[in-house]
Image: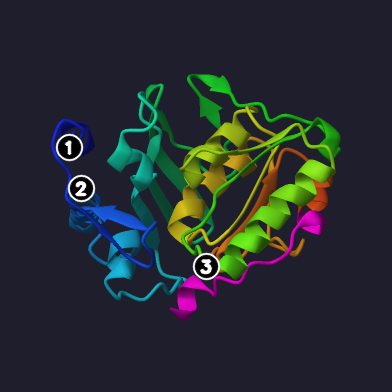
Amino acid sequence: QIIRKALTEEKRVSTKTSAADLVTETDHLVEDLIISELRTRFPSHRFIAEESAASGAKCVLTASPTWIIDPIDGTCNFVHRFPKRLAITVSIFGIHSWIAFGDMEMMCTGSHRQTPQRGLGQCGGGQRLCLGAPKNLSKALVLTEIGPKRDPATLKLFLSNMERLLHAKAHGVRVIGSSTLALCHLAAGAADAYYQFGLHCWDLAAATVIIREAGGIVMDTSGGPLDLMSCRVVAAGTQEMAVLIAQALQTINYGRDDEK
């Protein structure tokens, strides 16, 4: 309701780490609401949230029950109202002992909610999601995001990675403006792979559950296990595709969430 109301109003926009890293008062309002409601129900739980982190809160993932929250993923889309049917997500991830679940409200072709729990499978619209299954890049549609750093060296590496995939004859590389939404498109079989350097744990956590419950692969760009705090990821419908993407990439260093 907060987001829908804000779409009809003039927005106050400011920046964080770069001129392309946008935040609005709506981001803060949504995050405050989510944390307030969850804290009322679970007063002993910990929270990692995007705007709190931007204000200096530490991103430390411990064994304690923890919620990882992205109030609006796709803020640039939100600010520009792009596309006409807005492409943003509200992402909430909870972990307690060995139970992990994600709750994601996706505002794109209408509001759509996905709430997977690890080990119980993932459904969208009442039907099991189905990932694509190509095993080579020449038949793949790959999704990515640009990331907030726009210095010449970073942009050169970003464009070089896209060029490497296109030289491998990938069908295409797409940027849609929301990491979590892109990962959900992958889980639904609308794309074959995703990679990014510079995303954060709140961009990734809930979507990771969705992809894995749909039968997909999520791992580090080095080819090793995923580290939620590493600010980098490769995801794909098959292990073969994930490895091919990882091998094609040059690393862009964004540091770690838990060291900022």
Q: What element carries label 2?
A: helix
Q: How many labels does the image show?
A: 3
Marks 1 and 3, the one that precedes in the sequence: 1
Q: Residue 70 carries which label?
A: none
Q: Is mark 3 on a helix, strand or loop?
A: loop
Residue occupying the far bottom of the picture: 259
Give the x, y percent position of residue 70: 36, 52
Q: What element carries label 1?
A: helix
Query: Which image quarter holds the N terminus?
Result: top left
Front-most of residues 133 and 159 = 159
The rendered magenta stretch, by its main secondary structure, is classed as loop
Q: What residue type is labelled 1?
A: Ala
Is residue 90 visible from the viewing direction of this image?
Answer: no
Spatial CA distance of label 2 from label 1 is 7 Å
Q: In this view, does 84 lie above or below 259?
A: above
Graded by Cα atoms within 10 Å as few (under 14), some (14 to 19) or many (20 or more), the crowding at tag 2 reads many
**Was residue 252 drawn as part of the magenta stretch in this picture?**
yes
Give the x, y percent position of residue 72: 33, 46
Is residue 172 visible from the viewing direction of this image?
Answer: yes
Q: Mark 2 points at which residue?
A: 26
Q: What stretch is highlighted in magenta?
A: 246-260
| Side (left or right) of 243 relative to 117 | right
Q: Are marks 1 and 3 in contact (CB under 8 Å)?
A: no
Q: Name the residue under label 3.
A: 151
Q: Are marks 2 and 1 in contact (CB under 8 Å)?
A: yes
Q: In this view, does 181 lie above or below 14?
A: above
Kindly indicate the quadrant of the structure image that contains residue 132: top right
Marks 3 and 2, the one that precedes in the sequence: 2
